[in-house]
Amino acid sequence: MVHGGRLADGRAQWYRNRWVGTDAVQRRLGRARVPGPRRGAFETVNTNVIGHGGRLWALVEAGPYPVELDEQLNSVRHGLFDSRVSEAFSAHPHRDPATGALHAICYDVLRPRSVHHVVVSPDCRVTRVERIPVRHGPLVHDSALTQSSMVILDLPVTFSPRAAMGGDAFPFRWNDRHAARVGLLPKEESAEQVRWFEVDPCYAFHTANAVDLPDGGALLDVVVHARMFHRAEHGPEGDVPITFERWTLDAETRRVERAVLSDRPQEFPRFDERRTGAPYRHVYAAGFSRHHEPQPLLRHDLEEGRTLSHHFGADHVPGTFVFVPRPNSSAEDDGWLVGYVHALSEENSELVILDAQDFEGEPQAVVHLPHRVPMGFHGNWVPLSGIAGRARNRSPRRIGVSLP
């Protein structure tokens, strides 16, 4: 299910949610099949929503195609954007600020011996599919993009045939036999040009930014789990550390040097994505608790080496917060942070807008939603002026807003 709110002219205009139009959902709702190709039995799309090429796209990894949505969040069509290429995509593509193209490292449960680098042009055409050989079928949830290269995370959570044969819907497990490594693939080169860097065994779902180094290495900022899907099959384990780290990919030793930037458990790091692949200063992340305890939003100042916290009150937990730059401004922190905040004991949620330059201060606005938005994965801010999709008139729910 996709959740969205529209903000315009200083007002919160609507909130709505819509099921992504998979065949099972459409049958259950008595609706016509959504057009477009499918990849076999794979169809669940439940992880991220982005704007690209003047349209909205719901994304997942490992097999199903993206689903195009209109500006009212209704499903329009399935497909790998506007191409007939039959490939799995990623929940986390990264936009190249220099070209406007999307870059992603993708994996496919049907092809576990490789991952592939996919590039989608600004007009939604797949222009590159480059296969990179791997062992054991690693779970590659995210990647990163420097100005020159894709950063590939080949870490020891891999496809488990035993779990798949047992009917597990998510057949991936920790694999001590899989050597942990990080790859650098030049954006336009073949798989033979990948340089691999050894790293101590660990797992990472989400990256922040990555930057080229003059010697041919790179820096990568990433949230790190010491282990994943080892004893617990469906999420982080209770006694396993979660840290925010800076990884230095050393071009001479071909090793990854790890430095902890914050030892506070956290996830979903975001930054000013106009600076993708370029030096940057601020990272925003949601505090994480395995026991669903109240958590703050965190802001890491990478230059000063300090972390600020924004608390939303007792019994409240933030989801992903996205940085939205102020129009006509280039300063990294000149803008807003927008995200959902979940009330754990109440049947409602809020869409909260913070001033990024006054991170610990009162919110700029709080949009009160008519019911609780379930805690989900990812979201994005998409300017309506950049969306040319078709809209179907189905009444959204009215919402209230407070301006402190």
Image (cartoon, rainbow, N blue to C red):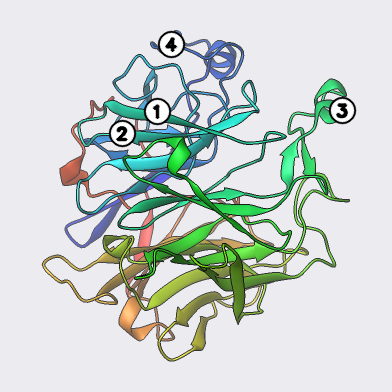
Image position of 210 (left or right of 200): left
Q: Earlier in the sequence, mark 1 or mark 2?
A: 2
Which residue in the rendered view is the most extreme toward the front? 252
The picture places residue 11, in percent across and down from the top left corner, at 24, 59
Q: Earlier in the sequence, mark 4 or mark 2?
A: 4
Secondary structure, mark 4, is: loop
Q: Nearer the viewer, residue 43 or 199?
A: 199
Name the residue: 37% across, 59% down: 400
**Residue 162 has which mark?**
3
Image position of 380 (left or right of 89): left
Disc 3 vs disc 4: which is toward the camera?
A: 3
Q: Earlier in the sequence, mark 3 or mark 4?
A: 4
Disc 1 vs disc 2: which is toward the camera?
A: 1
**Residue 120 has which mark?**
2
Secondary structure, mark 2, is: strand
**What's the CA distance linking mark 4 and mark 1?**
19 Å
Q: Which amino acid is tagged 3? A: Arg
Secondary structure, mark 1, is: strand
Q: Earlier in the sequence, mark 2 or mark 3?
A: 2
Tell me the residue that label 1 is attached to: 129
Q: Which amino acid is tagged 1? A: Val
Taking 164 as reference, is 326 above or below it? below
Tell me the residue that label 4 is attached to: 37
Disc 4 vs disc 1: which is toward the camera?
A: 1
Location of residue 253 (image quadrant): bottom right
Q: Earlier in the sequence, mark 4 or mark 1?
A: 4
Taking 82 as reference, is 183 above or below it? below
Name the residue: 23% across, 25% down: 390
